[in-house]
Image (tube, rainbow, N blue to C red):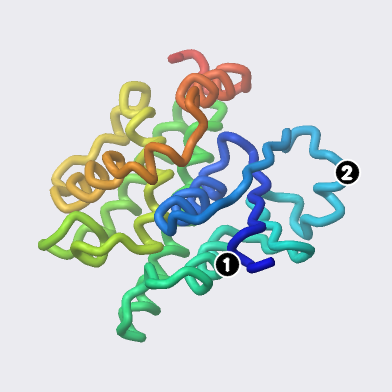
Amino acid sequence: MSTTSNLEIISFDLCPYVQRSVITLLEKNMDFKITYIDLANPPDWFMKISPLGKVPLLKVGNSVLFESAVINEYIDEISPPSLHPADPLRRALNRAWIEFASELLVIQYQMMTAKDKVSFDAKGIELMNRIAQIEPVLTIKGNYFNGNDFSLVDAAIAPLFMRLDIYEQYAPQCKFINTPHLSKWRDALLARPSVQQSVIHDFKDKLMAYLSQGNYYVAAML
């Protein structure tokens, strides 16, 4: 059996890192299966195969890959054409910004799970200041990070943009101001079918319910 015909993603249905890999699989038009688990009460079989106890995992036959950036690199390598630039330096820069996007997702989570207004506001400001660092490196031409071609950087940042689009009404500091290239990039990604189809159908409702159930500052605003 070929490696492209037996792919299974192990997922928590709100995880942005899983979403990155689903976007990549959809962009590649690959067949795959998704198995959802409850990360608060993970099954024994999952803990036995997940070295970090986190999702996503990608099961390829009897092998298991973990970490979304690694999973996406594998998907890209087995299904040409590549979603990386051909130039080695540009490709390395893309990988660096993928790592940067991972850090942004961490800050976003810290903001939405902050216990008080001071921490909530501080993390929101930190997040938007960090995101603004991308503005100068975005190309003027095209809708995506590398111009007209969708890439793995786009897959890596799209889950963050989707969440910020939801959070804007609760966190005014999450609005994109004086960043026209970022705003254009966000709008293009949120309109892309692979991004829209990369989450469960009731994603927003489930995300809001998750935040409402926690002892978080934002819960009072929902």
Disc 2 marks a residue whose amino acid type is Asp
Q: Position of residue 19 (x, y in %)?
A: 50, 46
Q: Residue at x 35, y 56 (%)?
A: 154
Q: Position of residue 83 (x, y in %)?
A: 37, 68
Q: Position of residue 111 (x, y in %)?
A: 48, 36
Q: Residue at x 31, y 35 (%)?
A: 174
Residue 5 visible from this viewpoint: yes
Is 148 in front, or is 177?
Answer: 148
Horizontal relation, residue 48 to residue 26: left or right: right
First-in-chain label (1 vs 2):
2
Is 60 in front, or is 210?
Answer: 60
Disc 1 marks a residue whose amino acid type is Val
Q: Residue at x 38, y 47 (%)?
A: 158
Gap between marks 1 and 2, in whole Å?
A: 24 Å
- For this orientation, the residue located farthest to the bottom is 88
Q: Which residue matches tag 1?
A: 70
